[in-house]
Each structure stands twice: as C-alpha cells, then as structure tokens.
Image: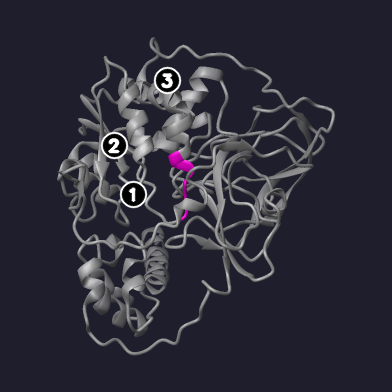
C-alpha cells in the first residue's frame, strides 16, 4: 500500500507500476465527434452470440432505432447511431482482425440527427427481470474493453445472492482517461445508474473504486453521493491491473474469488463506471448505447482528445478529426498499451468496447530480441492471480497445452504484467492467449462430440 494524505490506500497483491502517461488527456473535457458520412455496425461487437439484423438494404433508419436484436441470451441489441439509409449488410473488417457481418448506414446529410424518441423511462415500478430486459435490448456491454453483455452479470443465478455492487472506476491502463472524464462530467447519470442496479440486485452496499491518480474524480464523487444512498467512494493505490474484477474485489473487500469461479460466488457484482453511466442516461433520456467516450492519445497523434464517438465511426475519420497521425507513427491500438489490440486497417469501426485509440511512434514500438528464460521469477512476483508464468511459458513453447491446464492457465487474466517485467523479452501473455484459445476450441469439440 501507499499513502495519500497520511492514509494507507487499499490495493491487491502483486501487480506492476507502469507509467500512466495520462497527462496527455486527463484535463481535456469530453467533446462530441461530428457525424460522418458512413457508419459500419458489426453484428458481433460483444462476447457471445452475434446480434441478428432486423433491417434490410434500402431501409430508412432513425437515430436510436433498433436495427439488430439479441441473437441469444448472451447477446444484445444494436441501434442506429445516426438517421440515414442502410446501404449494405456484408462482411467488413473487424478490430479483432477478422471479416465480420456488419450493417452499413449512409448518414442523411439533411437530418438534424436528434434522437427520435427522447423520453425519460420510469423504472421504480418495474421488476428486476423487466429492467434487465431493457438493458439487454438497450445494447449495454462492459465499456472498459471486455464488452461482456451487462444484463448477463445482472442476471444472478438461482441460489446466488449479491451483497455488494462495485463500480469499476479504476481505469488502470496507461494513457486512457475516458472513464475519468465520464465520472467528472456525468456523475449524476452515474448515480442514477447505480440506483437502477441497486433496484435490480437488491444489494446492501455500493463501492466506487477509483485509483488515486484521479483525485479530482474522487473529490467530485464523494461530494455528490446522494445522502440516501449506501455508497462509498474508495481511493485505491495506483497499480496495474487493478481494473480486473478479481483484483478490484480483493482491493475493496479483501475477498478472493476462487479459481474457476465468478464474482457472484463471493456475493459481488462488478460493473464499469461508464457502463453504469450509460444505463443512467438511457433511463433519463431513453437513449440506448449508440455512442461512447473514446480517448484518442499517444505521441503519434497530433491532437489528443476525449471524444464522444457514434458507434460505427471509422478509425480513419476519428484520426482525421484529431489532426491526423505524425509521420513517425508506427502502431495503432484499440485500448491501452497493456491489453490493447493492434489495428492493421484504418477502416475498422469504433465499437462498444473501444475505450481508447493509442497512437505509438517508432520510439515506443521497439522490436526486442527474445532470449532464453533465466528463471529470475519476476513474472511470478507480479502475477496478480499467483500463477507461474515462467513454467507456463515453457509449456506453451513446447506446445504442451494440456499440461498447462494443470498449472491453471485458464485463470490467466491476460494482463501482460509478466511480459512487461520479463528481462528476456519473452512474449508470455501472447503465448498464453494462443494456448487458451486452442484449449477452448478443444473443449468445445469434446462437448460437441
């Protein structure tokens, strides 16, 4: 723990302290990204089953209109971010690297682009099931990057019970400040969203976890917590990966989520602050998730910014709005430097899980030679879930994936802390991702047979 104003701050065990590089954007207010001429809406921009299109080519759509319905329980609705015309439903480049079916909307240049059905939504008299259905069809996912459907987390299984709701305002990835600005500028909607989730979950206590590199947000939230709300704002030590659910639960409640289990197994539900704010805005204005705040940052962009971007806006359009890339830019990531996804196409769309666009130059993107493991165990010291990355790395290199299960590779949260500290430059987390993907495929084949 470290001290702030003479008090020791809570945190989790292990982890790392990379530079946060948030000064580029932490003081920049959210600004609205203008509507562009065309938007690309992938039907798969969340974990789970893709959404199913409800429109066809040639249809006129209005801003906020449902254009795709959930494709199953672990799936969500998708809405038009602009008023315009559906010009195609076809495979397009996806930030994940594949071609994915997408709805293409040409923006109506003569529309004022006002939300077509703005209204407040009564929620106090609705049941938990009704509210969860509205959140699912409103298209809400975790906006911290994972894009897990929010309604699934709120659907507590029979026999389970939630005592605590933890609002994740940590934003531990270096460079990113979208959640920071949302908490500062939209705290009223955040507290409304918390009330709605309290109503659904029947929790007795709410905690908002915020790292102490966001002191202004901590102050604003503490000052504005409603007097009748059982809610405490917890200042946390700045450490990575504190934004991971299990680490946040350990820091705030000192509870450990057992291997292979979920937060609800220790009576906790965790949701991102931006997601909860969006839910509050939906019930306040009737607007589903059709736009999100994105941090555009890094030494490779001419004008860093925190932008409110319509879902489906092309990466190239966002970069142009921010003054374009510098000549020595070498890599673009969706997300932060630790867990972000490198992009190979400028025509990929901003999606619901796109928390940031990180533009790195040749000074940051350095290819280092890999050396043999020296058994220094630095990776063991920093692993937040107490794995042995050194041993797992050796097994991955020899493709002994089955034995990796015995060393709990599926508990890896893919935070990259092990790769960050490795003096031999071994791409540990990349190898773990490949191994986990292959193991999941094998498990799926075994289940199908």
Using the rendered view, name the quadrant where residue 93 is placed. Answer: bottom right
Indicate which disc, 3 or 1, sits on the residue closer to the N terminus: 3
Asked whether residue 76 is drawn in magenta, I would say no
| Whether residue 325 is situated above or below residue 118 in the rendered picture | below
Q: Is residue 33 left or right of residue 272?
A: right
Please state which of the two labelled residues, at mark 2 or mark 3, is closer to the viewer.
Answer: 2
Where is residue 340 drawn, in percent x and y? 48, 60
Q: Could you tell me how many numbered marks the image carries?
A: 3
Q: Which residue is mark 3?
A: 130
Give the spatial CA distance, label 2 vs label 3: 19 Å
Using the rendered view, name the quadrant where residue 4 is placed. Answer: top left
Q: Is residue 147 left or right of residue 381?
A: right
The colour mode here is: one colour
Where is residue 416 drawn, in percent x and y? 36, 66
Give the spatial CA distance, label 3 vs label 1: 29 Å
Out of 239 and 50, give the one closest to the viewer: 239
Q: Which residue is mark 1?
A: 243
Residue 269: image tag: 2
Residue 288: image tag: none
Q: Residue furthest front?
A: 5
Please state which of the two labelled residues, at mark 3 or mark 1, is closer to the viewer.
Answer: 1
Indicate which disc, 2 or 1, sits on the residue closer to the N terminus: 1
Disc 3 element: helix
């Amino acid at each position: 723990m470290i001290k702030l104003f003479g008090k020791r701050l809570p945190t989790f065990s292990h982890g790392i302290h990379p530079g946060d590089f948030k000064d580029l954007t932490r003081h920049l207010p959210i600004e609205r990204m203008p509507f562009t001429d065309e938007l690309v809406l992938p039907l798969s921009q969340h974990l789970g089953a893709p959404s199913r299109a409800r429109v066809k080519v040639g249809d006129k759509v209005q801003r906020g209109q449902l254009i795709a319905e959930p494709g199953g329980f672990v799936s969500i609705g998708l809405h038009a971010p602009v008023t315009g015309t559906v010009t195609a439903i076809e495979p397009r480049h996806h930030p994940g690297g594949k071609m994915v079916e997408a709805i293409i909307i040409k923006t109506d240049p003569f529309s004022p682009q006002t939300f077509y059905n703005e209204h407040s939504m009564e929620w106090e008299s609705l049941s938990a099931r009704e509210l969860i259905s509205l959140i699912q069809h409103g298209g809400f996912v975790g906006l911290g990057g994972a894009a897990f459907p929010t309604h699934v987390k709120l659907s507590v299984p029979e026999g389970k019970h939630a005592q605590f709701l933890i609002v994740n305002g940590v934003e531990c990835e270096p460079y990113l400040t979208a959640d920071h600005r949302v908490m500062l500028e939209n705290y009223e909607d955040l507290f409304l969203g918390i009330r709605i989730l309290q109503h659904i979950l029947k929790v007795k206590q709410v905690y908002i976890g915020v790292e102490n590199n966001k002191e202004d947000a901590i102050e604003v939230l503490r000052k504005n917590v409603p007097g009748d709300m059982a809610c405490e704002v917890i200042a946390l030590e700045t450490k990575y990966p504190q934004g991971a659910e299990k680490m946040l639960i350990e820091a705030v409640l000192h509870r450990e989520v057992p291997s292979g289990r979920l937060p609800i197994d220790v009576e906790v539900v965790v949701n991102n602050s931006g997601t909860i704010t969006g839910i509050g805005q939906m019930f306040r204005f009737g607007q589903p998730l059709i736009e999100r705040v994105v941090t555009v940052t890094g030494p490779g962009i001419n004008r860093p910014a925190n932008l409110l971007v319509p879902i489906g806006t092309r990466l190239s359009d966002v970069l142009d709005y921010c003054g374009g890339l510098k000549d020595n830019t070498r890599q673009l990531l969706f997300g932060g430097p630790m867990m972000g996804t490198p992009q190979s196409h400028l025509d990929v769309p901003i999606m619901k899980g796109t928390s940031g666009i990180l533009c790195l130059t040749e000074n940051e993107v350095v290819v280092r030679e890999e050396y043999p493991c020296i058994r220094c165990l630095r990776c063991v010291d920093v692993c937040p879930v107490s794995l042995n990355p050194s041993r797992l790395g050796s097994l991955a290199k020899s493709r002994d994936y089955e034995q990796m299960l015995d060393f709990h590779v599926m508990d890896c949260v893919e935070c990259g802390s092990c790769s960050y500290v490795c003096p031999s430059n071994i791409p540990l987390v990349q190898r773990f991702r490949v191994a986990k993907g292959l193991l999941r495929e094998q498990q799926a084949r075994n289940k199908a047979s």
